[in-house]
Image: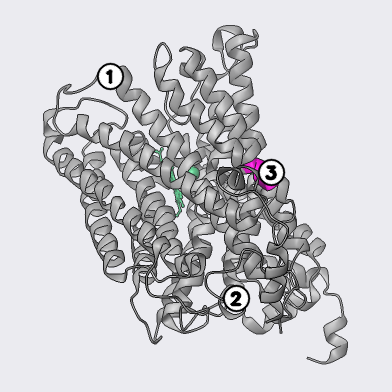
Amino acid sequence: MTQEQRGQKASSWQAARAVFWSFFGVRKSSDYDQDAVRLTPGQVIAAGLVGAALFIATLVGIVYVVMH
Amino acid sequence: MEATHAIDHDHGHGHPTGLMRWVTTTNHKDIGTLYLWFSFIMLLTGGTLALLIRAELFQPGMQIMRPEFFNSLTTMHGLIMVFGAIMPAFVGFANWQVPMMIGAPDMAFPRMNNWSFWLLPVAASLLVGSFFVPGGASAGGWTMYAPLFLQGGISNDMTIFAVHILGISSIMGAINIVTTILNLRAPGMTLMKMPLFVWTWLITAYLLIAVMPVLAGAVTMLLTDRHFGTSFFNAAGGGDPVMFQHIFWFFGHPEVYIMILPAFGIISQIIPTFARKPLFGYASMVYATSSIAILSFIVWAHHMFTTGLPTAAQLFFMYATMLIAIPTGVKVFNWIATMWKGSMTFETPMLFAIAFVCLFTIGGFSGLVLAITPVDIQLQDTYYVVAHFHYVLVSGALYSIFAGVYFWLPKWTGNMYDEKLGKLHFWMSTIFFNILFFPMHFLGLAGMPRRIPDYALQFADWNMVATIGAFGFGLSQLILLVVVLKCIKGGVKAEGRAWEGADTLEWTHLPSPAPYHTFETPPTVK
Ligand code: HEM
Ligand SMILES: [Cu+2]
């Protein structure tokens, strides 16, 4: 990783990916190293809340399909 | 040498000695010690209640007590163990270890820290004292379900008050821990370099701040229903008793993770130390812990499958509950992978940690069984549930506490504990634990309800076995008391780095015992 990349702030997409893997509980260590330097706490919290909402929506969707 | 000098200097201006030292202390190590002793006393108190329960259940028929008293015993056993033994023990660990592990001189709010602790004996006196008021101690179960809890005497008010006080203490403790971790880390100690124990406590503290007010709200509503004419949970006045269960479990399920996440943290310090390998998947452990914390808020109604939830809700909570087992499983995998091809030794902390991994997993699996709605409708309120939560709480939370005590005793006292006695404590506990709780799976599957003082004859044999296990397990805990007292009095001197594989700051930067004041000048972490 170059110094330039290091300083860069992560995109929302990267935050979303980090949160997705965290729900599963696994993270590749090279990806994690990037997360650690580039994600801000605010991004992680926002992505976490969106992720939780999506997770609930998916479950509700599955329940809907099962019941109809 | 710098550090030693600073200490000598500080001891110059005297602080109170004797009893007043403990009453007025703002030192995180003193307060940690207080929490741990308090927790141990509560463990023995709650344990005595449990032995009375098991004595009555040794044989079918009513032997030694009235059924009302039996109900008080199960209720108070639960409350005392959850709020008096397990939770304060982890706060004790946090007080001792978090500042040392992140290179901070103390907790962020030392005076509030003192108050957080001294509220606990007040609450404990209310709980224990309620046994002696007219009508006896609360008897509606540790979950305090309405409408039963709306009836009953003054002891229920004492319980409500005690829960309020405990809640205040927990919230203040949690705020203190969060602030310490976020603001007092030594230079270079980035979040992602923190030891896992610190991480798990950071997340636990947020959970506490989120859900203790919910519990406080629930018991306040009980109080106003009892005395101030409201009808939140009283159907006669237009209220809904099932709403109490929703509110209680919205607190209750995160609460079970409050009791297990710090345990995960302790185990994640111990296994790498005795396997002499870094923790496998540190990052994934951090992520999995956060994920468990978030998901723990959306599974609460798995405690309510028999309350007439709509089918859609039953399905939702079943799916959500089963999915939360995935990050939990990831952790178990990581611990095993850490041990894989490590050069392991089996000192007492490691024995308890390995037993934790095996036995907690059994508890996790029985949880999955209970998560299947149609199965739970059979098993709800049977001994199967009792077996489940004792595998996760005793061989989970309590075992991690034992492991942590043996692990850090050398740092706390400056002496090595007696390894022979430690191993004896481990083996006695583990053998009797399984004799005590494994048969409860059979009893539950055969249909024996929980919280009953008498039972049908077909349950007699396994109950007798369980009671024998209970007395064995209970008495084995006296070994721990002996080990701790012996270790405080003396023994082989511990080195600064008492465990070869230990690499956190308290082992690498501090002598044993850790001086009264540490890291007044923060270390630099590379
Ligand atoms: C794999 C993770 C887990 C799953 C799937 C799970 C599932 C369940 C379910 C479905 C019940 C309700 C049973 C019933 O009342 O019919 C239950 C009860 C309980 N669980 Fe778990 N559980 C898990 C982990 C834990 C952990 C880690 C703890 C605590 C450290 C815990 C503590 C409890 C307690 C105390 C109860 C009983 C509460 C009561 O009714 O008094 N569980 N669990
Ligand atoms: Cu639960």
**Which residue is disc 2 drawn over?**
B510
Disc 2 under 8 Å from ligand 1? The reply is no
Identify the element where label 3 is drawn.
Answer: helix
Q: In this view, does B191 lie above or below B156?
A: below
Q: Mark 3 points at which residue?
A: B172
Residue B214 shown in magenta = no
Chain ID of residue with mark 1: B
Q: Which of B399 and B419 is in front in this view?
A: B419
The answer to whether B38 appears left or right of B467 in the picture is right
Mark-to-mark CA distance, 1 and 2: 54 Å
Residue span colored magenta: B112-116
For badge 1, the amino acid type reads Pro
Q: Which residue is drawn at 54% across and 31% down?
A: B123
Number of residues whose C-alpha sits closer than 10 Å to that of mark 2, classed few (under 14), some (14–19) or many (20 or more):
some
Three-letter code, disc 3:
Met
Question: In which quadrant of the rendered view does residue B430 lie?
Answer: bottom left
**Does label 1 point to a residue whose CB lies under 8 Å from ligand 1?**
no
- Look at mark 1 in the image and give the residue it sits on: B67
Q: Do labels 1 and 2 share a chain?
A: yes
Near-viewer residue (B402 or B58): B402
**What amino acid is labelled 2 in the image?**
Leu
Image position, residue B514 (x, y; %): 57, 69
Decide if residue B335 is in sight here: yes
| Whole-percent x, y for residue B132 in the image | 40, 18
